[in-house]
Image: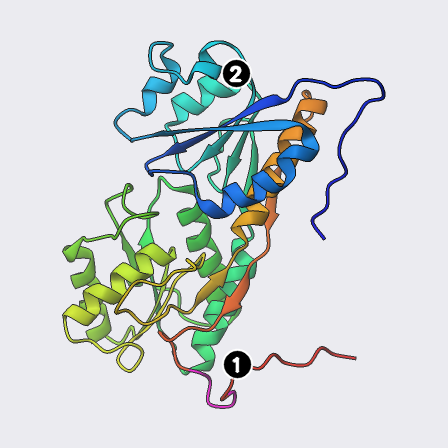
Amino acid sequence: MGYVAPRKRKGETPQPRNILMLTLGADEPPAGYMAGMSRVAPAFNFSLQSHVSSHEDSWNVLDPKYQPPALKMGLVAGIILIYKWPEEVVQALSRKWPTVSIVMHYPDIPIDVIGIDHLSGMFPLVKHLQRTEHKRIGFFGLRPDLSWARSRFAAYAEAMTAYGLPLNLEDVVEIPDTRSVVTFPFLDEGAFEKVVQKIGQGVRAWVCANDVIGNSLCAGLLRRGIRIPDDVAITGFHRRQYPWAHLPQLTTTEIRDDLLGETALQRMMHRLDNPTETPRLILMPCKFFQGETTSLPANKPTQAMEPLPI
């Protein structure tokens, strides 16, 4: 039910411990993450503090002149990382403070990561496209420097192979901009043109690395007169609760952001109690969400859930 028993010690009223959330490249921490962390923070006697930074100023978090006061004064018990930080910054921070990253994985840095089970999200998407008569399915939005984009591409490749669909690297479109793939529209017209060319060659379905990229692709194709889903099917990944205006709602995967935030804070509590334990990668589940950017399978005219086997 999400209840966490308060951690109390008889006869003691300990001071709350400060947990600093560091968010890069956004105006504020994601509301879902915040909701989950806020829900469990009182039970752990944690006080949540937030600091946001632009990409240009990311290194300032290591400079006492610009650090958040609690960090500069040594009053922080642990750090939660949100979005992608430079690896050198993560390395420096994690040497001094227990550190947990949400979604982003830093393979060479031994910190805990609360991630997403990309396979559980990607397999239903590819199967759905296959059931709607798509044989060639492209992948749009590969970014080699973003761990979640790599993992979703790997899950796409595994799903295509598992379902006997052709895996063509020529049907994979990389994008060059790492800063506008999470919170802002992606506007690379050259990448959109590559998709248009591939549509002309028969790639009539595309899995996008996330919903921001998926919505951006939908907007780019609609501007070119390409109909969705009549001419091409588009899926996203990691559903945004508020669809973009004037765009069809994406078929995508749903992930509970509040559960990601809650689990990150629970892991921080465990890390503080067990500082020498080896790092953990904890994966949160996904589920399929039928939107308006793909057709329904011919034998499933409604979104009704299939009955559970008895």
Whether residue 274 is visible here, answered yes or no, is: no
Q: Which mark sits nearer the N-terminus, 2 or 1?
A: 2
- The image's mark for residue 97 is none
Q: On the image, which quarter does residue 203 sit in? A: bottom left
Q: On the image, which quarter does residue 191 sit in? A: bottom left
Q: Which residue is mark 2?
A: 95
Residue at point 26% right, 50% down? 175
* Magenta part of the chain: 296-300
Q: Is residue 18 left or right of residue 12?
A: left
Q: Which residue is mark 1?
A: 303
Q: Of helix, strand and loop, which mostly describes the magenta segment?
A: loop
Q: Is residue 216 left or right of residue 30?
A: left
Q: Is residue 5 left or right of residue 90?
A: right
Residue at point 46% right, 46% down? 31
Residue located farthest toward the right when viewing the structure as drawn:
10
Q: x, y percentage for residue 8?
A: 79, 27
Q: The C terminus appears in which quarter of the rendering?
A: bottom right
Taking depth in this image into account, of 161 and 190 the one nearest to the observer is 190
Within 10 angstroms of label 2, few (less than 14), some, or many (20 or more) residues? few
Q: On the image, which quarter does residue 153 sit in? A: bottom left
Query: What secondary structure is marked by label 2?
Result: helix
Q: Amino acid at mark 1?
A: Gln
2 vs 1, front mark: 1
Within 10 angstroms of label 1, few (less than 14), some, or many (20 or more) residues? few
Query: What secondary structure is marked by label 1?
Result: loop
Residue at point 43% right, 75% down? 129
Q: Amino acid at mark 2?
A: Arg
Taking depth in this image into account, of 17 and 168 the one nearest to the observer is 17
Mark 2 and mark 1 residues within 8 Å of each other at the beta carbon: no
* Magenta span contains residue 298: yes
Residue at point 39% right, 62% down? 236
Q: Is residue 296 left or right of residue 234?
A: right
